[in-house]
């Protein structure tokens, strides 16, 4: 097969016009492990680490539903540099928590277990993660690496390339953690603009996949409000209530001041025709689409909090 004939899932998704709204995986805790060697296709699971330490870290992460990501800085690395690990935790108050450490031996990674059980420290800047996991999916490397370079040039202390974050067909994918915000369909230029706006607490709907503390239909509701009313801060909207009626959900969303209001957003979810959704996936699978049917101002807005 020539390069011209090779199937690329991100190209196919753009041709189909796949919706990425509501596609951020749910989760509020991340474990980052700096690893500069080759990343196995299955990331941390495939590393040849000391078995007991590896099992301890995996079990502790699983207990709090944390996502383990291997990370590295973009570009070449100096031999002997200290490797780092981190536990990042999202808090609804916006007072996000982080704990960082270093490791040289596999056994040092056992520190992560204690960090997962500790509250962590506030006040750290967010971490910008760019999926560049080529062994997992070709598009993640082809589209992710240029984005990693552009963002690293601008914010070298904040940006890390990382293993699979989900949604390969929306590459390049960027996750800002522990803010819990997924962005997709980025290139070098758009990624710099999106991250710059994010760091100024102005989230736009254009490249937004969703917020990881919300479930997919709720993500779609908030994205629709951002698209309708314009960019807003990460905690400008909060979900007050979600009710289900068949394939549809009515989601009441509260907007913060300066113009407090409440909205009822109807979201309908359905499955598409099966497609090949990833570069390496041999099976055809349907995607789930979350479509906003209506937005109505609630008659009796409920106070936030």
Image (spheres, rainbow, N blue to C red):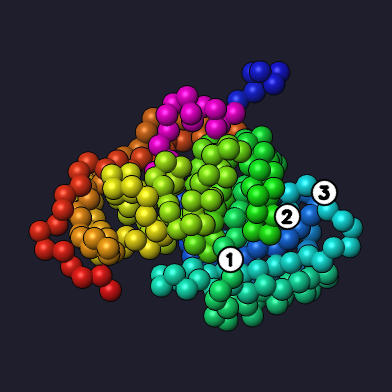
Q: Mark on residue 76?
A: 3
Segment colored magenta: 8-23
Identify the image quadrant of residue 53. Answer: bottom right
Q: CA distance from mark 3 to mark 1?
A: 24 Å
Q: Secondary structure at mark 3?
A: loop
Q: Nearer the viewer, mark 2 or mark 1?
A: 1
Q: Mark on residue 72?
A: 2
Q: Position of residue 255 (x, y in %)?
A: 27, 60
Q: Is residue 234 left or right of residue 261?
A: right
Regarding residue 25, the answer to whether it shows in the image is: no
CB within 8 Å, label 2 to label 1: no
Identify the image quadrant of residue 88. Answer: bottom right
Q: 41 or 229: which is nearer to us?
A: 229
Is residue 183 covered in magenta?
A: no
Which residue lies under the disc numbered 1?
Answer: 125
- Mark 2 or 1, nearer chain start: 2
Q: 3 or 152: which is nearer to us?
A: 152
Q: Position of residue 178 (x, y in %)?
A: 53, 64
For label 2, count other residues whose C-alpha is less than 10 Å away and answer few (under 14), some (14-19) or many (20+).
many
Is residue 19 covered in magenta?
A: yes
């Amino acid at each position: 097969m020539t390069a011209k004939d090779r199937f690329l899932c991100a190209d196919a998704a753009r041709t189909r016009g796949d919706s990425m709204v509501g596609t951020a995986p749910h989760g509020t805790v991340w474990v980052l492990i700096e690893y500069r060697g080759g990343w196995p296709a299955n990331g941390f699971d495939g590393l040849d680490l000391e078995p007991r330490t590896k099992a301890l870290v995996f079990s502790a992460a699983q207990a709090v539903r944390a996502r383990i990501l291997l990370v590295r800085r973009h570009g070449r690395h100096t031999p002997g540099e200290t490797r780092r690990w981190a536990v990042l935790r999202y808090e609804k108050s916006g007072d996000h928590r982080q704990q960082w450490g270093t490791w040289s031996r596999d056994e040092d990674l056992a520190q992560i277990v204690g960090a997962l059980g500790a509250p962590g420290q506030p006040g750290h800047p967010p971490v910008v993660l760019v999926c560049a996991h080529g062994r997992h999916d070709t598009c993640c490397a082809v589209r992710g690496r240029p984005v990693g370079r552009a963002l690293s040039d601008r914010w070298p202390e904040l940006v890390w390339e990382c293993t699979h974050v989900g949604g390969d067909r929306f590459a390049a994918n960027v996750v800002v953690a522990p803010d819990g915000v997924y962005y997709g369909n980025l290139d070098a230029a758009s990624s710099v603009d999106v991250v710059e706006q994010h760091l100024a607490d102005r989230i736009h709907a254009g490249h937004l996949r969703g917020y990881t503390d919300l479930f997919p239909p709720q993500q779609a509701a908030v994205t629709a409000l951002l698209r309708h009313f314009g960019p807003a801060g990460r905690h400008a909207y909060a979900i007050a209530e979600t009710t289900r009626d068949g394939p549809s959900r009515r989601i009441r969303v509260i907007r913060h001041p300066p113009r407090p209001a409440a909205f009822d957003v109807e979201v309908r979810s359905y499955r598409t025709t099966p497609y090949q959704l990833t570069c390496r996936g041999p099976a055809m699978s349907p995607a789930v689409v979350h479509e906003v049917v209506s937005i109505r101002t609630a008659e009796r807005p409920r106070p936030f909090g």
